[in-house]
Image: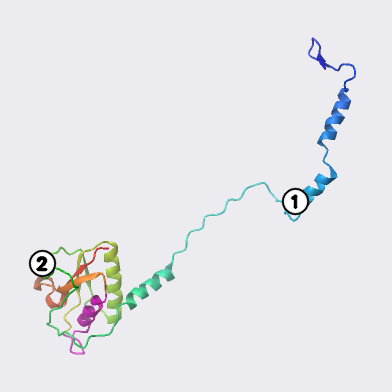
């Protein structure tokens, strides 16, 4: 084909006319029966959309694991057995316990109250059940906050109906079951005397 000076396309002798060219292009774009059948098989079972908008999935707020936390609390609480050692201490007896390997200097410093108190728990007047739960939760929080030395007030139990300091004996027994407790001893008189203890904790 050639172009004349006016920019019009001129078909040379023997070339297709514009009409023939259009028909040729239409035939080239025509879909065969085989292709139509293949397309129908591909889209079989596909449900067409009623709209052309994309729906993004909504962000779900993660549920608060209340039951898991409750179960964890109970496990921690149940770790503290209520079995009391037959050799119970009396009201005015001093408490003293330490793990093997604790240096004498560390224990001496603890008994003198020379460690700064990072946290304090007052169990005085609580029932045994409430005290056990409070102690377990207190020690858990102390671990999270890397507390080193804490003071626990258990009272002297002089007014106990059993004639012995029940809560003091239970605290003495509970703490010995905890691997995070390195040592504990009765406090100085200014910090509660035999009605309270200093507890040295393992850093988490």
The residue wearing badge 1 is 42
Residue 33, position as x, y percentages in the image = 85, 45
Locate the N terminus and report the quarter of the image it occupies. top right
User: Which of pointers 2 and 1 lies earlier in the amino acid sequence?
Assistant: 1
The residue wearing badge 2 is 105
Q: Is residue 26 magenta?
A: no
Dots 2 and 1: beta carbons under 8 Å?
no
Q: Secondary structure at mark 2?
A: helix
Residue 197, position as x, y percentages in the image = 17, 73
Q: Quadrant of residue 113?
A: bottom left
**Magenta residues (range):** 158-177
Residue displayed at 90% across by 19% down: 14
Q: Residues within 10 Å of mark 1 (few under 14, many from 20)?
A: few
The Cα atoms of the two marked residues, 2 and 1, are separated by: 82 Å
Residue displayed at 88% across by 20% down: 15
Q: Residue furthest right?
A: 14
Colour mapping used in the image: rainbow
Is 130 in front, or is 27?
A: 27
Is 181 in front, or is 70?
A: 181
Q: Is residue 5 above or below residue 178?
A: above
Q: Secondary structure at mark 1?
A: helix
Residue 12, position as x, y percentages in the image = 87, 16
Locate the C terminus and report the quarter of the image it occupies. bottom left
């Amino acid at each position: 084909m050639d172009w004349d000076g006016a920019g019009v396309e001129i078909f040379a002798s023997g070339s297709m006319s514009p009409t023939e060219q259009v028909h040729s292009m239409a035939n080239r774009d025509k879909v065969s029966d085989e292709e139509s059948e293949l397309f129908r098989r591909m889209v079989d079972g596909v449900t067409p959309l009623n709209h052309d908008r994309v729906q993004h999935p909504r962000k779900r707020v993660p549920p608060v694991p209340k039951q898991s936390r409750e179960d964890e609390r109970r496990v921690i609480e149940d770790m503290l057995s209520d079995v009391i050692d037959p050799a119970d201490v009396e009201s005015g007896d001093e408490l003293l316990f330490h793990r093997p390997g604790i240096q004498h200097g560390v224990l001496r410093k603890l008994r003198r109250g020379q460690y700064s108190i990072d946290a304090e728990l007052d169990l005085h007047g609580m029932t045994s059940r409430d005290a056990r739960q409070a102690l377990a939760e207190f020690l858990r929080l102390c671990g999270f906050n890397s507390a080193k030395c804490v003071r626990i007030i258990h009272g002297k139990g002089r007014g106990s109906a059993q004639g012995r300091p029940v809560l003091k004996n239970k605290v003495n027994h509970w703490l010995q079951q905890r691997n995070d407790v390195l040592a504990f001893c009765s406090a100085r008189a200014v910090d509660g005397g035999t009605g309270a203890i200093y507890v040295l904790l393992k850093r988490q």
